Amino acid sequence: MKEPGMQKFSIWSLLRNAASYHEGWQRQWRSPEPQREYDAVVVGGGGHGLATAYYLAKEHGLRNIAVVERGWLGGGNTARNTTIVRSNYLWDEATHLYEKSMKLWEGLSQDLNYNVMFSQRGVMNLGHTLQDMREIERRVTANRLNGVDAEVLSPQQIREILPFINLNTRYPVLGASLQRRAGVARHDAVAWGFARGADALGVDILQNCEVTGIRREGGAVVGLDTARGFIKTKKVAIVAAGHSSVLASLAGFRLPLESHPLQALVSEPMKPIFPTVVMSNAIHAYISQSDKGDLVIGAGIDHYTGYGQRGSFPIIEGTLQAIVELFPLFSRVRMNRQWGGIVDVSPDACPIIGLTPVKGLYINCGWGTGGFKATPGSGWVMAHTLAQDRPHRLNEAFTLDRFYNGHLIDEHGAAAVAH
């Protein structure tokens, strides 16, 4: 049974529960048994899937919804990314979608009554060549025309923010772009906050519930075969990141995606020293510092395709070489752990959000290395698409049809790096 009401977090609830040794806190979400039938089922219990369910319930009034997850909530790419949030993309279609997400990020903790630890510390994209700087000028201008904050920094301005950066590398730093509203958030808190909010609105969250089949009749979805039995439904949203192609094959169609490992690593904790996020496309590495003090470091995808989550050592070595070249003072910092996620990359490095050839089956995938920053915006437009059976104007350019009609949105390298 659902617990009555969602317990509100506040300074008063914290003080009240402190007096009882914190034994009176409510469960964050239920672990119900699957119902026989739902109005809609979201496949994938990561940030995008949980956000879809939350906005379906909150914005569109659907209550008989389930989220099915083969493992545990947020255990996939949501827990395996570097938590960067920004909206400084080049093309109008991408910019509008990511800026919608940015605006949702800015009020997300209040909306969910859950601290997602969104820190707007800024994201800096370095330019190392004259062509880099031309592209930075172009992108900053495009951002401003679309109402997105962006500015060009000189080497001196970069050094004022990061006095310990080495500007005279093999590829000298000639300048940078900066989006001050951008930053980082806490990935676990995002998944937990959306799960808690969705559960409070009546959504059933079913963990350890792998989808093994998608049943169709007359070209339309009628239900899902899962590890916890058959679930009847007329609407299914596939929001499963790197495994979207596998689920699409269960429904009898193919997606234009490649799945690659994407690696990241964190250092031992340090005192606060790094005030922003720095990204470089020329040497292909990026770095920020978490609230715990770890240096969070990443780079590009491994070039081979596969579903392994370990990645290869050459990527790690090249990434750390680039970071040490930019920031020599980190040369003796020890790395604490490394991991890999599975990203699904489309031909134009943009997501696929919309209808599929199967009636009642919807898809949200292809985010590549840029999925985390889009979490709330992705869920918001996907919820509209699912509820209205048509794309929202923000995602109508990102439907599967563009790979038939040729209206691609090429963001490969257009936003400095694809993360």
Image: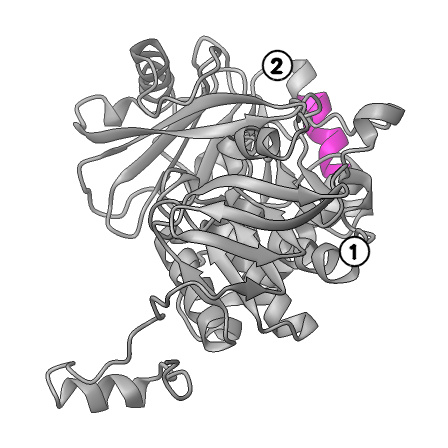
Residue 251 in picture, x, y percent from top left: 63, 35
Residue with the mark numbered 2 = 129
210 vs 289, left or right, is right
134 vs 41, left or right, is right
Element class at badge 2: loop
Disc 1: CA contacts within 10 A as few (<14), some (14-19) or many (>=20): some
Kindly identify the amino acid type of the residue bearing the numbered disc 1.
Answer: Asp
Residue 47 in picture, x, y percent from top left: 48, 52
User: Badges 1 and 2: C-beta atoms under 8 Å apart?
Assistant: no
* Badge count: 2
Visual colour scheme: one colour
Residue with the mark numbered 1 = 389
> Which residue corresponds to the image point at 45% horizontal and 8% vertical from the top-left?
170
Query: Earlier along the polypeptide chain: callout 1 or callout 2?
Result: 2
Please provide the residue range marked out in magenta: 133-141
> Which residue corresponds to the image point at 45% horizontal and 40% vertical from the top-left?
277
Q: Which mark is residue 191?
A: none
Task: Tell me the mark number nearer the camera, choosing from 1 and 2.
Answer: 1
What is the CA distance from the residue labelled 1 to the residue labelled 2? 46 Å
- Extreme residue toward the right, this view: 405
412 vs 227, left or right, is right
Say above or below: 270 vs 53: above
Front position in the image: 270 or 68: 68
Kindly identify the amino acid type of the residue bearing the numbered disc 2.
Answer: Thr
Front position in the image: 202 or 82: 202
Front position in the image: 174 or 338: 338
